Image: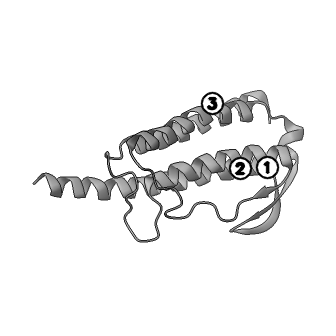
Amino acid sequence: MNRLDLERLATFSDSVRDSTLKRLRRVPIGRENDTVLEGMMSPADIAAHLIGSDEGIFRASRDKVLVGKGLGAAGQRVVADRQEYVALIETLVRLRETRREFILAQDDHTLAELIPFDTLSGKGERDLASMIYLFLDHEIHHRGQLVVILRHLCEIADKESV
């Protein structure tokens, strides 16, 4: 992958994160642990899960293995107050830049390295480049969940204001 392509990928990564942050910030105060359905992740769960995902791809690159079982379940992260939730968001802001730097630091050799994985989706191995794309897709998936949660929370807020 040439330098321009890496810069484009890093810019796309930033856009994905910016969109996620926008939605996380729109969660009404006091609703950080709320969800739409039993067993669905809350905004706090999603924020913590995305932090773990970012840290996971960095570890996978360093350790040459990805273990991802037991990550991202409803109720794994319950925040006590808005301050604790904002701290999660601030961590995602910092990781946005770390992820950008991580992507830009790659070269053809590191992107082609095969990394074994053992996740909920099964076992196998993928090259680092594919993993980066999959992790971005993963964040986009959870951003979609946030949209559903926000719509639900807005409906609740509308009913409460009547």
Q: Position of residue 146 (x, y in %)?
A: 43, 53
Mark 1 lies on a secondary structure that is: helix
Identify which amino acid the numbered label 1 is placed on.
Answer: Ala
* CB-based contact (under 8 Å), mark 2 and mark 3: no
Q: Name the residue beneath numbered marker 3.
A: 97
- Pick the residue in front: 86 or 130: 86
Q: Position of residue 114 (x, y in %)?
A: 87, 53
33 sits left or right of 18 in the view: left
Q: Name the residue beneath numbered marker 1.
A: 60
Can see residue 106? Answer: yes
Circle on res. 56: 2
Disc 1: CA contacts within 10 A as few (<14), some (14-19) or many (>=20): some
Can see residue 19? Answer: no
Identify which amino acid the numbered label 2 is placed on.
Answer: Gly
Which residue is at a point 90% across and 39% down the rendered structure image?
109
121 sits left or right of 75 in the view: right
Q: Quadrant of residue 3?
A: top right
